[in-house]
Image (tube, rainbow, N blue to C red):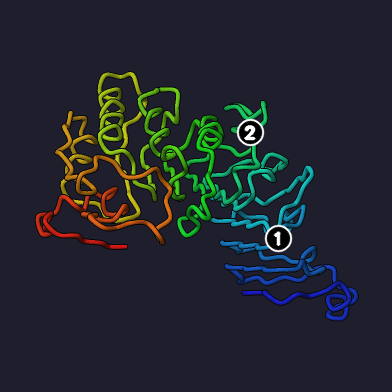
Amino acid sequence: MHISCHMGGDQSALVAPEMTQLEFPFLEELYLRRGEPKWINFLRAPHLASLHMYGFIPSDLRHISNSTISSIHLEFGKHNPGLREIHLPSADKLQLDVEISDLFCLNVYPSQFQFVVINTNWEECLCPPFWVVDYVSNLLGTVTELNIGNEHLGRKDGYSYPSQRILSFLKPFAYLKHLKLLWGEISGSACVDQLAQLLPDPEFLPELEALSISEYPSWPEFFRYIQQRQTGFITGRCQTSLKAVTIKGPVHGALLEHLRGSLAGLHTSLINIPPRRKGSKEWPAQPFERQGFDTDGLLCCYVCHKAGLEMGAWYSLQRTWRRC
């Protein structure tokens, strides 16, 4: 059942003025969007398996089903300041899509999150002092999968996402197994580079097994830190090893081979990457405006260089080639 139209209190009252219970005995999936219908308090779905709520979240949903729901997805609407308490029926998997500032003011019962999605303005968010392992575990439960950002909302107009705040937010997630960091590069250095530096630390995301990123790392350092994480697991210093690294973009095969070697715990030396520009060793400071940038003499565009695509033998270094 998909309910997407707004139903005001008067309209709900006209449906059943004396309503005490509205039961759908065979309903398995329910999608509610936009405004909150008054009759939500009377809704019963004893065999409900999947509940999705967008834009409004009632404070108490325990009455919907007495059985365990397979999946609950709560997507909050606009910013809702202030402390909120939400009571949910038992569920195998809970997905929360919320502004981080709202998350700090949220109490959910029971706390049993496995999957959390965070899309927010990190420039305005600081983790409070109480944001530690014990607090996060009591608030959210054993979160095993975490998505931060949106791969379609990269860096805009030179705006930078402060990576230190993201890393401070991540540290208390002691049970995290899958991390998706889906933002474009920040100014200064990529967030994934600072994240990679913490991978050999046995106290940082000790159960992390899979990492998905949408920005290109600094390849030699990235390979080295992964290799250190893997050898730390082999020697017993780290609790788990990385089993998968996903990069949301094209990457040259030679770099992927080095990544496979690093995941195997093997030391790898990076092959030399051709220069980006004739007569120059480095790219200009990032980010730079593509329009108006002098591309004369470029051997490849910035994105292709970060992906290592210029290493392909099919590109002639004797001519200018641009992807952008």
**Residue type, label 1:** Ile
Residue 286 x/y as whole percent: 41, 45
Q: Could you tell me how far apart the alpha carbons at marks 1 and 2 are, in whole angstroms?
A: 34 Å
Left or right: residue 236 compared with residue 17: left
Q: Sort mark 1 into few (<14), some (14-19) or many (20+) by Cα contacts within 10 Å.
A: many
**Badge 2 density bin: few <14, some 14–19, many ≥20, Cα 10 Å:** some
Nearest the viewer among 77 and 37 is: 77
Say left or right for 209 vs 8. Answer: left
Q: Residue at x 79, y 44 (%)?
A: 82
Residue 127, which numbered label?
A: 2
Q: State the image quarter where residue 264 is shown.
A: top left
The nearer-to-camera label among 1 and 2 is: 2
Res 47 quadrant in image: bottom right
**Which residue, as the protein is rendered here, is positioned at the far bottom?**
14
Rendered position, 17 above or below 200: below
Question: Which residue is label 1 attached to?
Answer: 64
Residue 123 locus on image (x, y percent):
61, 42
The N terminus - image quarter = bottom right
Q: Residue at coordinates 37% horizontally, 56% vertically from top-left?
A: 293
Q: Is residue 21 visible?
A: yes
- Nearer the N terminus, badge 1 or badge 2? 1
